[in-house]
Amino acid sequence: MFDAILSASPERPFIVAQLGQSLDGRIATTHGESRWINGPAALDHLHRLRAHVDAVVVGVGTVIADDPQLTVRRVDGPQPVRVIIDPRGRLPASARCLAVGVEPCLVIGDHERVVPEGAELLVVASTEGLLAPSAIVTALFARGFRKILVEGGAATVSNFIDANMVDRLHILVAPMILGSGIQGLSLLPVDRLGDALRPETTVHVLDGGDVLFDCDLRHQRRG
């Protein structure tokens, strides 16, 4: 399941996105609790993904909600650069991702501004205040980041998929039904089933019951 990342061409960026969710497609409760939806094996897989990429990208909303470190701890491997998409300067100075890692966090915005200690600003042009996934990937690739993990949240992952910027999507489904809560992927609507994404998909059952759907978005199945 990591072969595609390992064999990715150095001539172009390779983007893998991941999302952890319940059986009914929820990534958090109505109150935002999400940390223990997926089990230990799924978390191990996420940390292996981090160890296989050059940079891990999240939206600032994920930092505010979950305060992740975005480091490799559960497995052996190198540390990726942490990248926060933060067009409106919402990143709190107390965020844990700012105090870990060898290199500073990269904070992506569309204008020069002061960022918290432990961060470095990367300015990317925006359109009507929105940072396009393609512009973000281009800027990261120019910095030498060839393999990029888009880790969350759901809106960020969805935006990258809608922009056709994701090569591989890993969806980790936990044997849990929430019945309500925050929805996972929310993509642009399609009018016909024939227009739906039908990626070639490999399924892996992990210890503890979580199921990994490894979706190759560059190869669609027919019918």
Image (cartoon, rainbow, N blue to C red):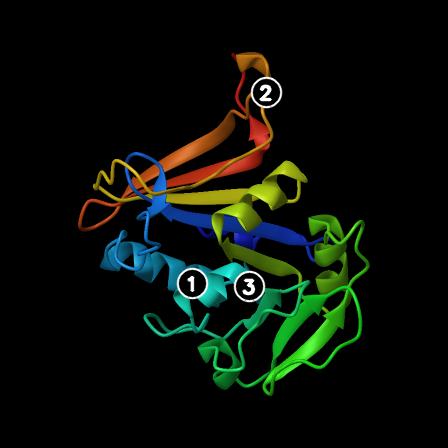
Give how far across and how far down residue 92 sits, in percent.
53, 76
* Foreground: disc 2 or disc 3: 3
The amino acid on which the numbered mark 1 sits, given as a three-letter code, is: Ala
Front-lying residue, 40 or 132? 132
Q: Residues within 10 Å of mark 1 (few under 14, many from 20)?
A: few
State the SS at label 3. Answer: helix
Q: Nearer the viewer, mark 2 or mark 1?
A: 1
Numbered badge on residue 190: 2
**Is residue 214 or residue 176 the one in the foreground?**
176
Of residues 220 and 117, the one nearer the viewer is 117
The answer for how far apart the CA atoms under marks 1 and 3 are is 9 Å
Q: Residue at x 55, y 63 (%)?
A: 60
Residue 60: mark = 3
Element on which disc 2 rests: loop
Q: Position of residue 131 (x, y in %)?
A: 72, 54
Question: Would you place residue 196 above or below residue 201 in this image?
Answer: above
Callout 3 amino acid: Val
Give the mark nearest the N terminus, 1 or 3.
Answer: 3
**Where in the figure is residue 181, as x and y percent of width and height?**
33, 43
Q: Give yes or no for contact between labels 2 and 1 (Cβ–Cβ under 8 Å).
A: no
Element on which disc 1 rests: helix
Callout 2, which amino acid? Val
Compared across the picture, whether 146 is left or right of 97 comes to right
